[in-house]
Amino acid sequence: MKSFIFDVLESLKDKGEDLSTLYFILPSKRAGVFLRQELSAVVKKTIFSPTIISIEEFVEELAELTTINNTELLFEFYNTYLALTPKQEQESFEVFSKWAQILLQDFNEIDRYLIPQNQIFDYLAAVKELDHWSVGNDKTEVIKNYLKFWNKLKLYYKHYTQNLIAKKTGYQGLIYREAVENIQNYCTSTKRKHIFLGFNALNTAEETIIQELLKNNLAEIFWDIDETFIENKIHDAGLFTRAHKTKWKHFEKHPFNWVTKHYKNNKNIEVLGVPKNIGQAKAIGSILKKLETKNPNLKSTAVVLGDENLLIPILNSVPKSISKLNITMGFPLSSIPLASLFEQLFSVHKKASEKYYYKDIIGLLSHQFINPLFLNGTINTASIVIDTIKKNNLVYLNVSEIKQYAKNNASLIELIFNPWKDDANKAIENCFKIINKVKEYLSTNKEDNLISLEYLFRFNKLFNELFRLNNTYKHIQDISALFSIYTELLSSETLDFKGEPLQGLQVMGMLESRVLDFETVIISSVNEGVLPSGKTNNSFIPFDIKIENKLPTYKEKDAVYTYHFYRLLQRAKNIFILYNTEVDVLTGGEKSRFINQLELENIHEINHKIITPKVPGFNNKLKEIVKTKTVINQLKEVAQRGFSPSSLTNYIRNPLDFYYQSLLGIKNIEEVEETVAANTMGTVVHDTLEALYKPYINMELKIEDIKDMMPKIESNIEMFFKKTYAEGDMSKGKNLIIFEIAKRYVQNFLNLEIEDLKAGNTIKILALEQKTEVPLNIPELNFNVKLKGTVDRVDLYNGITRIIDYKTGKVNNNQVSITNWEDINLDYKKYSKSFQILAYAYMMNALKPLNFPVEAGIISFKNLNSGFIKFTQKGGKKNSLITQETLNSYFNELKKLIIEICNPEINFVEKEV
């Protein structure tokens, strides 16, 4: 395939041009690399390389000004703003930067299109005055300031541009305007021939410069447009080229080079609808794998990203066999792991608080670049601090408290957590110190940390730029403004990939494809809102004024991308167009109008497919743990230590949970309880009731005894919360509500006791929170088995022994009843409460024979109206009295369950919970 660049060079050579003396001007620097390659194919002898530059470089040369980055332009503009705005009306740099960036874009457009400045600024001010004309003299302060702003635009522009020119710098538009001012002088002082190639949408300044050079016979221009687009008066791919051909005087007497006829040649076009962006990346990986079988080096193959955020997923999807790869776009610095560290630091210190939230502390201490700094031999101090925070429920900590838990690394804690006190210079200084600390650590093993050290170098460079800007302009007064500028700089910084630019697969953005031609093209994200980007208007200049002044609108922007899209297709033979089929908040999920247009043109046969990912069949087979010798030995140890009722009901619920918790000892991950957890409150209520009733064990309760307990409720609950909830704060928020609920639970329970006593019932406390452990007689097992547990309360109620289990959750009567004994081991939801209270009754009887009949049941603090909810056995009639026979029936089922648990032939099989 002959490329456009090759055709241009061959044409110039055939005309007898000395190629080494020519001055090639291209839309981008990247195109220059390919021009040099094609030059070696056209010229068969050794020559000096011609000058090859981008249009931006050429215009800078003409204007004798240097482009400075957007951030520095913003700082320079703030100087202008401060100089022209009364002190009492001045906004902070952070507020200013929000609107100033949009205004600078407008200045840029006005200059690039050579709009008379005074004319457009006066016009804008007059329009805004007219908008508020009906208000008359009753304008509010807001409206007055608003109109004042529009009247000042002309002054801002004049002061700002004069300052920039005085410093020999400028933004792109200003440089273009100055270049136009100098073009005539340039034409009289040069004899070299300029070759412009591959241009499409030219701004007014570019048109003026090129036409002036053409007029003076100092230039030739080569267009790359297909007759299909230029002859169709409504085809946007030819919108600009048609205008240039019609309006430029040069083409009245000179030929228009070139209108080609490549687009209608046979092409294999596949349009692939793929769900989600990751789906597109995977699909591109599959396409490349197929292409590689026919074209191993993937010569003249390009992946063009409509959405540049797809770069990393696509790189991860490229087949490993592809060794040669060139990526023209950089990897965003904001996506590397180190960026998250500084984002966390700014997030923590922006709040300017003496105390830090535990999640922020844990986030910083566990960060991959910070955590290793706390290594002292085999001990990691950061891990100790994190564990202490979780164990003690520390929600907010100051620096001295963090240092207390990390004594070996106190200076490092100070470096990370000492308040920045809203001081931008201190923040930058601290970030430099952190970078140096991380560098010291990584340098101890340089070979393994080359990429991380490169990251550090780039961030060091970024903070150097922040330091320079702040030192030069002194506009950053606080952390919030610093973070805003840091984010701005970060978003524009990239890490460049290394690769051979002319070999193998090319991965690029849409704009990098300008002037380049490939045989095989894969274009991703061809969706409305991406390609083209749609109706965005980030400007202060209204749409109608833009049209009146011939400034570009979204219509022209769409036409630019239409040209790039179709130009990629012009010479290509194999084309794969991918779009996202899924509805997305930002992109709408609708395929692009470009795809519809391709289909409606009816020039090429379009092979349209919807690709769905292969969904592997999930094996829903329940997990099974085989009872090996080791497992059986562990079971014996657990049995000899004692099964608890809760561990046995855990087995009924799901044998796998029993295995993980009772045999492997795997506990739930310990987390900081910002809000008191239900089990913590349950423990506090249990402990409080035990403390209140303890003095009355083996005594018959009187109403006065219960009343004496009332004033002690709050102090006991407070004490037990401090013990159980460690250093968690109970004085505010949800925790305060939970504290009051715990108090109310205990008060309501005591009131229930008083009502019972008033009704003439007698209550005598026999035991509280009694830890019990009894051996079980199971001859079928050749090892000892115990049952152990803690009984919340045992009392005598009107002479009948009651075994009581407290529950802070809600329990209903139907949850403590049973009809068939065989069911007690089968259904956790229905019978787990019955299983537990009968276990307590069995243990109490085994410890010391009970005076039958007895009662066992639950007091539910969320269902106190039901009082003591007794275990009942349903049959012909309900029976709530427990006898020896009841316990014998229970023991038979208990024995069956334990034999099953310990049976080597019955594995632990997962239940669907």
Image (cartoon, grey):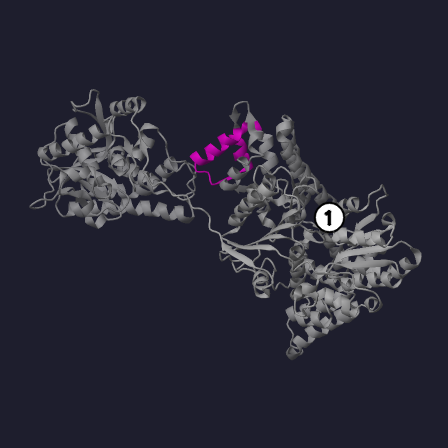
**Image check: 552 left or right of 616?**
right
Percent x, y of residue 854: 12, 37
The reply to whether residue 526 is visible in this rendering is: yes
**Image check: 801 left or right of 97?**
left
Residue under the image location 77 percent in, 56 percent down: 197
Q: Between residues 465 and 730, which one lies in front from this camera angle?
A: 465
Percent x, y of residue 138: 64, 77
Label tally = 1
Percent x, y of residue 50: 84, 47
Residue 402 within the segment the image draws in magenta: yes
Percent x, y of residue 895: 17, 29
Q: Which residues are magenta?
A: 381-409
Residue under the image location 28 percent in, 32 percent down: 908
- When the figure is inspected, residue 518 is found, relative to residue 114, above or below; the finding is above
The reply to whether residue 66 is visible in this rendering is: no
Mark 1 lies on residue: 30
In the picture as drawn, the residue positioned furthest to the right comes out as: 189
Q: Between residues 729 and 631, which one lies in front from this camera angle?
A: 631
Q: Which amino acid type is shown beneath numbered disc 1?
A: Arg
- When the figure is inspected, residue 96 is found, relative to residue 370, above or below; the finding is below
